[in-house]
Amino acid sequence: MGEAVPDTRIDTSRQAEVVRRLREFLPPHAVLFRDEDTRPYECDGLTAYRRAPMVVALPETDAQVRHVLQTCSALGVPVVPRGAGTGLSGGALPLADGVLLSMAKFMRTLRVDPVARLAVVQPGVRNAAISDLVAPFGLYYAPDPSSQIACSIGGNVAENSGGVHCLKYGLTVHNVMRVRGYTIDGEPVDFGGEALDAPGYDLLALAIGSEGLLAVTTEVTVKLLPKPQLARVVMASFDDVETAGKAVAAVIAAGIVPAGLEMMDKPATHAVEQFVHAGYDLEAAAILLCESDGTPEEVGEEIARVKQVLTDAGATRMTVSRDEAERLRFWSGRKAAFPAVGRISPDYYCMDGTIPRRRLGEILTFIGEMEKKYGLRCPNVFHAGDGNLHPLILYDANEPDQLHRTEQFAREVLEKCVEVGGTITGEHGVGVEKIDQMCTQFGRDELETFHAVKHAFDPAGLLNPGKAVPTLARCAEYRGMHVHGGQLPFPELPRF
Amino acid sequence: MQAVLDALAEQVRTAAQSARALRPRGGGSKDFYGNELAGEPLDTRAYAGIVSYEPSELVITARCGTPLAELERALAEKGQMLPFEPPHFGADATLGGCVAAGLSGPRRASAGAVRDFVLGTRLLDGRGRVLGFGGEVMKNVAGYDVSRLLTGSLGTLGVILEASLKVLPRPALETTLRFEAPKDKAVEWMNQWAAKPLPISATCYLKGELAVRLSGAESAVRAARERLGGDEVARGEDFWADLREHAHPYFAAEAPLWRLSLPSTAAPLGLAGEELIEWGGALRWLAGAGDARAIREAAQRAGGHATLFRARDKSPGAFAPLAPVQAKLHRALKAVFDPAGIFSPGRMYPDL
């Protein structure tokens, strides 16, 4: 984390030149460079990293975006695209010698076609705003990251964002039909389309989740789904976390694909309950939220099956939401988990590993050991249906060494996720945050291939450089320092 | 298995050194697909077997040479299925060919395509290196999504050695309804119904008849059947299997077969030849000897593209030409995975 931000000095003559060139076609208010103006852009949702950009550009039209990219390409200035700035991995961390390209002014909905069930929106449109907009047609946009009231669809495309309903409805990549934008050279690109496939390679899939390294998005066509007639959620209590984990596997093994399947441990429910009063069972070691949606008949049938499976799996208490208000209240706690934890601790650090579900008990035990080893608490919220963990390490950045211990804690957990067959990031992205852990998950050949893919789109390496994929040199250094689950080579040697 | 893999890698390295073309090939069931075949076949069938299958994880991992039928049998035993309902086009179809061809069946419009269920792959690239992308978990955003890029790449980027796929439980009940309707009305209904929370899992229109498959919980299927009306069809599963495999009499025509992928709401294009419509209006087969350029232009005007799917004469090119920027990116990506240009040259595009 923190150490990854080396250069923060801004070359003022370079800055003046870039400002002058950008102001040739952008109005003065769309080119920011004074410290007080660029400061709001110094970080995204990962606030542990901060760095002021050399210049912030706020274009309003496609032509302006293209012009910014052409200008930066010609000058050899790196460009960091930014959506709503809610990302949790530092993907929009600025560069001291770069232009921060804010897409915040791209707020228009270009077209809604309720018959073809799609919406064409600009990248700055908020995720939740899409569903609000199409609700009168009985439609919605399925991926619902917890930050959905603030995060933008452009950012969702960059990160391949998920949410609590992914198991049944998929991620961004399953729900976006087309992405239009520009390469770093300012060439217009069009990935996917309004048909269900496009000729040639699946460049749409490659662009989604590319963390702004391949192209800048200026237009997104999303798929809309008919809103299920009814949704109900079962809230089940368990007196130990591992039993709850096994109950999750039992639900899936019974042939049920719930609309949502979430788990929270006791420290997490306690933090949340004080904050939102969701009505969680505070005695339980863990609670599961299992949602069923569909026609009333279907939901009735599925809820009955879910209750049976959970009872057999050892649930100690179960409540089924009686109406929409209660359903939303049950979810409100889960969706507010991060801010709730933010209230009980000065700082928290959110992990995003994914594991095969059957390894859940093992991972939770491991996290418990790490809590003792590093002397830090770590409540857990978990997209149990798809194996995506969000352990939240609580720390205080003002206490010397706590941030460092947090980083070590997180590193060990993510490496454990890889070891059990999972991944270091399920939906938050690598950004700058998990760049070292990429060295654990991928070998030299894969990393080389990723760099080559980037080169195919951006030969000069100017678009969001330094994010998502570590250099081979950095990995060699990292691997040299950390081998075998945190055991340093030659542990007997003194280090400082 | 390691010896089989080593032998494949050795063949690739040798071919790369001598710039000799190779064509990864499983059962050969999709040899008809794409442009004219070039290169010596690289037989993948010996690299076979299910590597892991954990029904409660909804994931199966298997080697490329695994027969698709074997994979589907293993899933069926546990009450699960490949949600994209891939066409086999022959008893010898393999998993590798299924992923490389990227073709999906009748359930595509409601469940998703092959690429939507590919979670991870292992690839033998043009340097003879074995690379791993993605994994066995549903959510994974570490690194570029190369596995989905490989899906449908027709063996032009390397040998897809292994794939991990998300699977789903089989629906409790399926039933097929038949309606009489003219073409434009059928397309309108397909779109209207898709916008309602109905358990429709497949649609097919041909010659004034619209077939609709309902899949799901018993109660949901029953309720939808009452709501939609229509006549229930006996042995509906055979109808959809024949459609998927192109064993339906429609596909026996001698004329070239075009596959038009269009926005689902596109108005009938009025092209010469018999049309069969699937995927809620988004997939339109056209059996006819019309002018290739006119067909491609009509598809493009409607917002889609046309593939010359089966034909004796593939000279118009199997796939719709790419825009210049796209073509440039394709060539650059090809060079990333296959720098010597040995894999399936020309199968997708002449310069790829």
Image (spheres, rainbow, N blue to C red):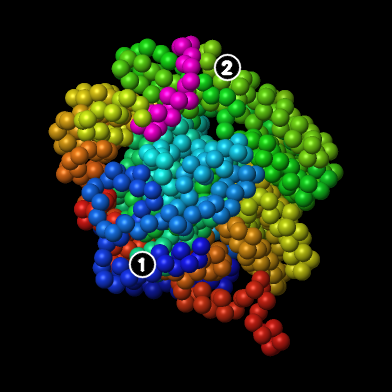
| Residue A311 appears left or right of A42 | right
Q: Give amino acid for label 2.
A: Arg
Q: Position of residue B261 (x, y in %)?
A: 31, 35
Label 2, on which residue? B222
Q: Is residue B291 above or below residue A240?
A: above
Q: Disc 2: which chain?
A: B
Q: x, y percentage for residue B125?
A: 38, 63
Say whether residue A244 is magenta.
no
Residue picked out by circle 1? B11
The front one of A97 and A295 is A295
Q: Nearer the viewer, residue B287 or A13?
A: B287
Residue B85 in picture, x, y percent from top left: 46, 36
Q: Determine whether the residue tagged by mark 1 lies in a helix, strand or loop.
A: helix
The quarter of the rendered structure image containing the C terminus of chain A is bottom right
The amino acid beneath tag 1 is Gln
For the residue pair A248 and A181, the one nearer the viewer reads as A248
Task: Sort mark 1 into few (<14), some (14-19) or many (20+) by Cα contacts within 10 Å.
Answer: some
Q: Quadrant of residue B30?
A: top left
Label 2, residues with CA under 10 Å away: few <14, some 14-19, many ≥20 = some
Left or right: A493, with A239 as reference point: left
